[in-house]
Image (cartoon, helix red, strand yellow):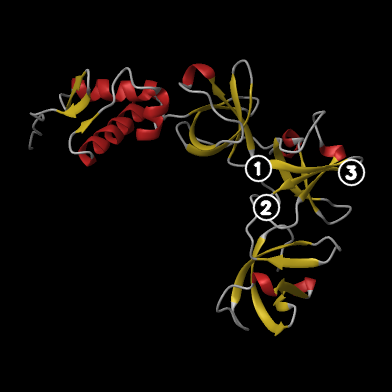
Amino acid sequence: MAIIGKRNQLTVLKSAPPGFYLDGGPHGELLLPGALIPEGAKVGDTLDVFLYRDSEDRLVTTTEIPHAQVGEFAYLRVVSVAPRIGVFLDWGLSKDLLLPIREIKQEGVQQGDWLVVYVYLDAKTDRIVASMRVKRHLSTTLPAYAEGQQVNLLVTGETPLGYNAIVENAHFGLLYHNDISTPLGIGLRIDGFVRAVRDDGKIDLSLDRAGHQRIDVNTEVVFDALKKAGGRLPFHDDSTPEEIRAAFGLSKKAFKQAIGSLFKERRIMITKHGIRIADTQPKSVSK
C-alpha cells in the first residue's frame, strides 16, 4: 500500500504523455511526471518514489528525495514567508513544505532562518506540513536504551546545562557542556552514546562511550589511525578539539585518555611533535 509522506516501492502500470502511472493500491493510479522518470525505467519496473499532494491537491509521486519524511524531525531553511498562512521550508522537493502559522513557536521568523521541525500528515487536510512544537511529537514511552548504546542524535538547541538533542527520532536527551570539548551546531546530526536513562524518561548523552569500554575502544581508534599513517601523527595535548574530532571522531578529553592509556601500555611515544608507535611493542604471552 502506498503511504502518503513516505518513500514507497511502486510498480509502473503504464506509460502516457504526462509520464508513468504507478500502482498506488487504494489510491489508484499515481502519476510520476515524465521529467522525473529514471533513465531506462519501463512498464513493469518497481520504482522508489515519494508520495505527496501537489499544489492542486492531487496525489503525485516523485523520485526526488525529501530531507525528511512524515514522522521525522529535521532542520530546514525558510524560503518564503506568507503572512496569515505561515512559512514555507526547503525540504528537498520542488514543492516547498508549509509550516502553518499555528505551528510556529517563535516570533519574527524570516526568510533564510533555519528551524528544527517535525514533519507530519495533517488529519484535517491530508496534507504534509511541519511543526516547530517538536516536544509534543516525541515519544511518551519510557526509553529502553542500554548504557553505552550508540544512538543517532539531532541537536535542537543550547541550554545553560548543555545541548538538547532528539534521540533516534523519538526521545529527548541532553549532552552536558562539561562532556563536550567544542561547541555544537543546532541542526547537527551526529552519533552519540547513552550515559543513563532517567526516571522522567529523559536521556543523559555523551559523544564518547562510557567508562573503561570507551577508553578501550578509543585506544584502538587512535592506534589504528597511527598504523594507517605509517606510525606517526602530528596530534598532541596542544592540538585543537576541532582537529582531533576531524582526525579521530573523538573529543579532546577522550583522545587524551586514549593516548595516556596507549603510553602506559608502551604502545606509543608522546612527543612535542605528536604521537608515534613505540619502537618496542610489549610482547604477548602465549599460553
Where residue 169 appears, as percent x and y from the top left, is 62, 42
Could you tell me how far apart the alpha carbons at marks 3 and 2 are, in whole angstroms?
22 Å
Which tag, 1 or 2, sits closer to the chain's start?
2
| Kind of residue at badge 1 | Ala
Residue at far right of view: 84
Image marks 1 and 3: residues in contact by CB distance under 8 Å: no
- Please name which of the two marks, 3 or 2, marks the residue nearer to the observer: 3
Q: Which amino acid does the dot numbered 3 rest on? A: Ile
Nearer the observer, disc 1 or disc 3?
A: 3
Amino acid at circle 2: Gln
The quadrant where residue 63 appears: bottom right
Looking at the figure, which quarter contains the C terminus? top left
SS type, badge 1 = strand
* Label 3: element kind: loop
Residue 49 drawn above or below residue 149: below
- Residue position for label 2: 69
Asked where in the image residue 187 lies, by quadrant, the reply is top right
Residue in the image at 63% along x and 73% along y: 37
Residue on which disc 3 sits: 85
Numbered-mark total: 3
Q: Are marks 1 and 2 in contact (CB under 8 Å)?
A: no
Q: CA distance from mark 1 to mark 3?
A: 21 Å
Are the residues tagged 3 and 2 within 8 Å (C-beta)?
A: no
- Other residues around mark 1 within 10 Å, as few (<14) / some (14–19) / many (≥20): many
Question: Which numbered disc, 1 or 3, marks the residue that appears first in the sequence?
Answer: 1
What residue is at 8 percent from the left and 33 percent from the top? 285
Q: Is residue 6 visible?
A: yes
Task: Estimate the x, y position of residue 259 in percent, counting from the top left.
Answer: 26, 24
Comes first in the chain, label 3 or label 2: 2
User: Mark 1 — residue?
Assistant: 74
Q: Considering the numbered disc 2 on the image, is that residue within a helix, a strand or a loop?
A: loop
